Amino acid sequence: MPPTESPTTAIERLLRSGDAAGALRIADELIKQSRRSFPGWLSRGCANMNLGRIADADVDIDTALKLSPTDPQASLLRGMIDQRLGRIDNAIKHLRRVSASSAPQSIEASNALAEVLWFAHRRDELAAFVAAGGAWLRDPRAALMIARVRASHDIDGAITDLQSIAARERSPILRRVAGFEAVGLLDKTARYREAFDLSVKLHADTTPPFDLEGMLAPVRQQHAQLASASAWPAPRVEAITGLAMVVGLPRSGTTLLEQMLDAHPSISGIGEYDGVDMLANDLVSTGRWPRAASSIARDALLAMQSRYMSGARRLTREGATISFDKTLRAWRWLPAIAAVLPGTVCFQVARDPRDSAISTFLSYFHPINDGWTASLTSLRRVIEAERSILPSMLQSVGLAHECIVYEDLVEDPTGHATRCLNRLGLAMDARVLAPEANTRAVFTLSHEQVRRPINRTSIGRWKNYEFAFDSSWDALACAHDERRVIR
């Protein structure tokens, strides 16, 4: 008879196989048996991190470290979570400690530390860390860091290195990351056709089939209800206060708006918080959303609200009274947000659909969660779906909101910032006009752009790739131009 598998061994096996939900269930059982179970809290944090539930993982790893303050695995996870939450100094502190140790986690910590230094734009520190050498440089991922350092003084050489990684490495994620970084450098050096062709190849090689119809189904239901002029049910929970949320697609200027508003002392950006995903999953799991929404127990709605707000507040900077959630999922779930989080103030951000599409297509997105980014055709269909319900849906479900056209925001940042702050009941603060001075680190694809003063350079980017756009984009482009106030 084979030996019984221990809970920790089972958790490790499930995490290796990609079954983070299964690992979470076992971790919860360990914690149920003892609230002081270090393996339980550590495993729970790892599972939640793999599930993208960063706010929950944040709590789990804090608890684990209270039980075992010097554990290298817990310190590694603490540093990785802190990076995701923009707590850069804390992330570096934890990761340096593990990186310099003889613990088995030192290689992983070194790679994570290099990643933090890169996203935090501490490029001199990254170059020094790479130059210092160490066993971590023998890890396949280190080649990516070496190429990033090389790009600061030899772009062509870095492009060659990144393309080599994309072509030879076994890990599809490493190939994809390196490949899209090469795309970015090709674009930067005006090698547009090469950038586009490499993107096509990367998407074809590393993006699995994606259920676009399944993604758009709830949007079509909302569009049909808008067309029928049917009223959405009134919220059955009290309105919350102190929450603002982006409503828009990736690469639409959402990070710029977040960094601007986060510079106000009363507003704290909380990044792409996973709370809307969890809220939506909780509603759908009742089996009653959306067709029998009124039959969902009020206590269940209150529990969902409490869970979302608890996570958001944990991520909010001390002293701030408003949490700004830069989720990219809200546009599909506005009725759900109105039902569970009434009182949310929404900021819909729209950019020229062609600029948004090409910026997305040329960038790294998760190949499974965001597989719709793999072709301009699927990107167009998603943008069409989004604009079929926005901004009308915000009005229909009764969410307070402002509509912002990215190009107008860039042309008149003072006017738009004033309008946003007025909506939040706040006075203008000149710091919001200098997002490049915001010391908050950004863990998004726009981390480079928001380090520069507000500028127009990204407007009309699609024209460098005009060969990729046909007449099917004309209606979207015309509709967007009609929304612009400043031309």
Image (tube, rainbow, N blue to C red):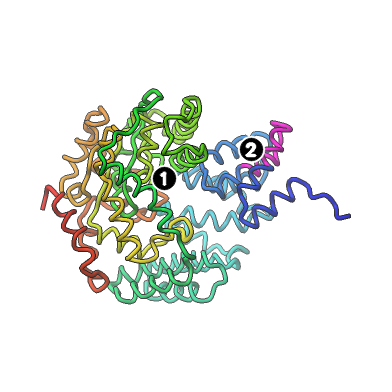
**Span of residues in magenta:** 27-44
Q: Is residue 40 visible in the rendered structure shown here?
A: yes
Pick the residue in front: 357 or 362: 357
Q: Residue 350 location in percent, x, y? A: 25, 50
Chain-order first, disc 2 or disc 1? 2
* Residue 357 occupies quadrant: bottom left
Pick the residue in front: 276 or 243: 276
Circle 1 — which element? loop
Q: Residue 9 magenta-drawn?
A: no
Residue sitting at 41 percent across and 24 percent down?
237
Check the image and report above or below for 150 versus 482: below
Q: Residue 35 magenta-drawn?
A: yes
Q: Name the residue beneath numbered marker 2.
A: 65
* Residue 472 occupies quadrant: bottom left
Q: Name the residue beneath numbered marker 1.
A: 272
Q: Residue 155 location in percent, x, y? A: 37, 72
Check the image and report above or below for 256 versus 243: below
